[in-house]
Amino acid sequence: MFHVKQHLYVRIDMSIPGAGSVTHLAELEEIDSETCTMLRIIELDPAERIRGAATQDMAVGMDNRPQTVVPHPDTYADFPDIDARKLTDEEFEGLWAEASATFPEL
């Protein structure tokens, strides 16, 4: 049977000991129940402004290049420093359009 890979959209608020917090909005492609491929990501500053963004090929304005394979959102409850919620594809695409306008090199 043919399995269509599912795209997931998620907002992740992380607390980083000694460094503060960071918010990422991500488009992920499900690999299995434990992992996903990172397709696109947007990083917000504490005022909810776009600070950086990345695709699989390029990162702009982000301190760290995102990992290619990341934990599946269904596993985030296992990480005490992460709060996550689903986004709709429309929410993500709207913010991606803004990120693309801010960083045309994407």
Image (cartoon, helix red, strand yellow):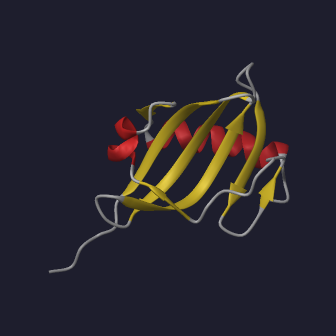
Number of residue marks: 0
Q: Where is residue 61 in the image (x, y as percent from the top left)?
A: 84, 47
* Residue nearest the observer in this picture, 11 or 1: 11
Quarter location, residue 58:
bottom right
**Where is residue 35 shown, x and y percent of the image?**
39, 61
Residue at 72% from the left image edge and 70% from the top image edge: 57
Q: Which residue lies furthest to the front in this view?
A: 18
Residue shown at 67% from the left, 44% from the top: 42
Q: In this view, does 82 lie above or below 71?
A: above
Residue 70 in the image: state x and y as whole percent. 50, 57
Q: In which quarter of the image is the C terminus?
A: bottom right
Quarter of the image that includes the N terminus: bottom left
Hey, which residue is sitting farthest left in the picture?
Answer: 1
What residue do we see at 52% from left, 35% from top? 11
Look at the picture and state if 103 lies above or below 34: above
Left or right: 61, with 26 as reference point: right
Left or right side of 81 for 36: left
Residue in front for this viewpoint, 30 or 4: 30
Using the image as rendered, state which of residue 42 and residue 90 is in the foreground: 42
Residue closer to the observer: 96 or 85: 85
* Picture layout, residue 102 above or below residue 16: below
Residue 1 in the figure: left or right of residue 59: left
